[in-house]
Amino acid sequence: MMMQTGLRPEAYAWAMVTGAAFGLIRAKTGNVAGLVVAHTLGNILMSAIVPVR
């Protein structure tokens, strides 16, 4: 989280939420491949939300 400094508040919150979600996905599946899909969907969502602001 220290590397996330300088982000807008919504991006910072998104980084915290996705970090927790990625940790849960990794713990439940034991596989890193599932995180690729989740990360891609998160990036697409943030790309759509931030310009609206």
Image (cartoon, rainbow, N blue to C red):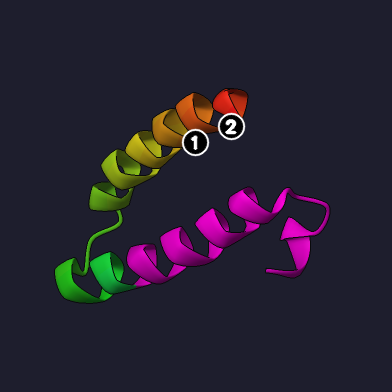
Q: How many marks?
A: 2
| Residue bearing the label numbered 2 | 50
Q: Secondary structure at mark 2?
A: helix
Q: Is residue 24 magenta?
A: no
Q: Residue at x 17, y 74 (%)?
A: 28
33 left or right of 13? left
Label 2: few (<14), some (14–19) or many (≥20) C-alpha neighbours in 10 Å: few
Label 1: few (<14), some (14–19) or many (≥20) C-alpha neighbours in 10 Å: some
User: In which quadrant of the rendered image does the C terminus lie?
Assistant: top right
Q: Amino acid at mark 2?
A: Val
Q: Nearer the viewer, residue 45 or 38?
A: 45
Q: Nearer the viewer, mark 2 or mark 1?
A: 2
14 left or right of 20? right
Main SS, magenta region, reads helix
The answer to which image quadrant residue 27 occupies is: bottom left
- Work out which residue is located at the far front of the displayed protein and give it: 53
| Residue bearing the label numbered 1 | 46
Q: Nearer the viewer, residue 49 or 26?
A: 49
User: In which quadrant of the rendered image does the N terminus lie?
Assistant: bottom right
Q: Residue at x 57, y 61 (%)?
A: 13
Question: Residue 16's spot in the image, x, y percent?
Answer: 53, 66
Q: Amino acid at mark 1?
A: Met
Q: Secondary structure at mark 1?
A: helix
Q: Confirm or deny contact between disc 2 and disc 1 (CB under 8 A).
A: yes
Magenta residues span: 1-23
